[in-house]
Image (cartoon, rainbow, N blue to C red):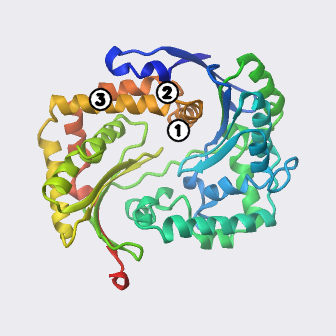
Amino acid sequence: MIRKISSAFCALFLTFSGFAQEVEYTEYDLDNGLHVILHQDNTAPVVTVGVMYHVGAKNEVEGRTGFAHFFEHLLFEGTENIARGEWFNIVAANGGSNNANTTADRTYYYETFPSNNLELGLWMESERMVHPVINQIGVDTQNEVVKEEKRSRVDNAPYGKIIYGTGINHYMFKKHPYKNTVIGTMADLDAAQLDEFKAFFDKFYGPNNATLVVAGDIDTKDTKEMIKKYYAGIPRGPKVESINIKEESITSTIKAKEYDSNIQIPAKLYVYRTPAMNERDAYVLDMISSILTDGKSSRMYKTMVDDKKEALQVLAFPRSQEDYGMYVLGALAMGETPLETLGSSIDEEIKKLKTELISENEYQKLQNKFENNFVNSNSSVQGIASSLATYHTLYGDTDLINKEIEIYRGITREDIKKVANEYLNENQRLDLDYLPTPDSE
């Protein structure tokens, strides 16, 4: 079927004109369950081929955390027809670039090539899907790579436990696998046997658990023929059951302390459990985050950094996820400012959102900002490919790439007040003091 999405060029005028030029995309299913989305844009000779697998950290079993992220690395090792260590060389030699990323909910691989190498990109991703070589040499090699990534990004990075959730998740979730982190534990990966890695691949990396996106300088008819050639014969994998684990509501404040030997500046953090990413309230929380801390004109920055000079920096970000989200709100202390003082100031700003409507001027600035964010997210074929895959895989509605901005446009000042009252309550949060370890002070 044919859908419409907004052109990035004309969308630059959305704020003023209220509409944008539209381009077409097509989506369909192969008999083996592979969902295909094609976006044709012949303005530049570039094409992105991406495959999103509906598997992330939440699909791992207890005691084997980190598998999905591990496979983000392992599936670049090589295939039956791509020699070990040659994946990146092939891409670079053909003028391309590639990457992959993993969340709690999905894993995404992509290549961007000059458009005359479209078939190469399609072949390489089909090789990853059907012919990967999973052996002990590859597992041992990538185990060391992941360990180094964990050391550099989490263990030895200032505030790494907050950024990557190792200091938060287990407080917010007791039953759901979101209690674990995407990178997992090295003990779990060390203990895993080769057969377990092979079984994980067989369970989750079939075409029926994947979305293939091709965006850019293509001919839709020719591309369909190439996709049929390389993907139609791949056998369907086992059915992947959805995670359906319900958490009990948080009804009293969770008070905790976490220590980090990499920091000198303590932080006060409030963390709230929030709705799934496809619920309207999650979009409202995005806007609340922007009101509070997005830029030097935000409320918390002006009050706590500029006026009171009690915070060195402020932060607020929703961690959107498929089943539940988290909303992290906090500040880094300036000088000897007590964390209790930071907490009181944050609560004052939350109270204002709960009791007063934001001004019409602030509301219009907020709408303009989200219009601009929407344009930027789809300003390249690489961004469009990622968005198309995400909207289909995690939201179940590819056309959100066109409609999502309407959700933000429909959020009112009254909605912002209502959602603040529903979710940003003292008895529904983690109250976390994030401190330097005593030895580092």
| 178 with respect to 141 (left or right) | left
Q: Quadrant of the C terminus?
A: bottom left
Q: Residue at x 14, y 53 (%)?
A: 348
Tell me which amino acid carries mark 3.
Answer: Gln
At mark 2, the secondary structure is: helix
Q: Nearer the viewer, residue 268 or 114?
A: 114
The part of the image, by quadrant, that contains residue 1 is top right
* Residue 104, numbered label: none
Q: Find disc 3 in the rendering and name its residue.
A: 367
Q: Position of residue 285 (x, y in %)?
A: 31, 42
| Residue furthest bottom as drawn | 439
* Residue 394, numbered label: 1
At mark 1, the secondary structure is: helix
Q: Earlier in the sequence, mark 2 or mark 1?
A: 1
Q: Find disc 2 in the rendering and name its residue.
A: 401
At mark 3, the secondary structure is: helix
Distance from Cα at disc 2 to Cα at disc 1: 13 Å
Q: Position of residue 401 (x, y in %)?
A: 49, 27
Residue 423 vertical placement versus 230 (above, below): below
Q: Position of residue 407 (x, y in %)?
A: 36, 27
Q: Earlier in the sequence, mark 3 or mark 2?
A: 3
Q: Position of residue 410 (x, y in %)?
A: 30, 25
Distance from Cα at disc 3 to Cα at disc 2: 17 Å
Tell me which amino acid carries mark 1.
Answer: Leu
Distance from Cα at disc 3 to Cα at disc 1: 24 Å
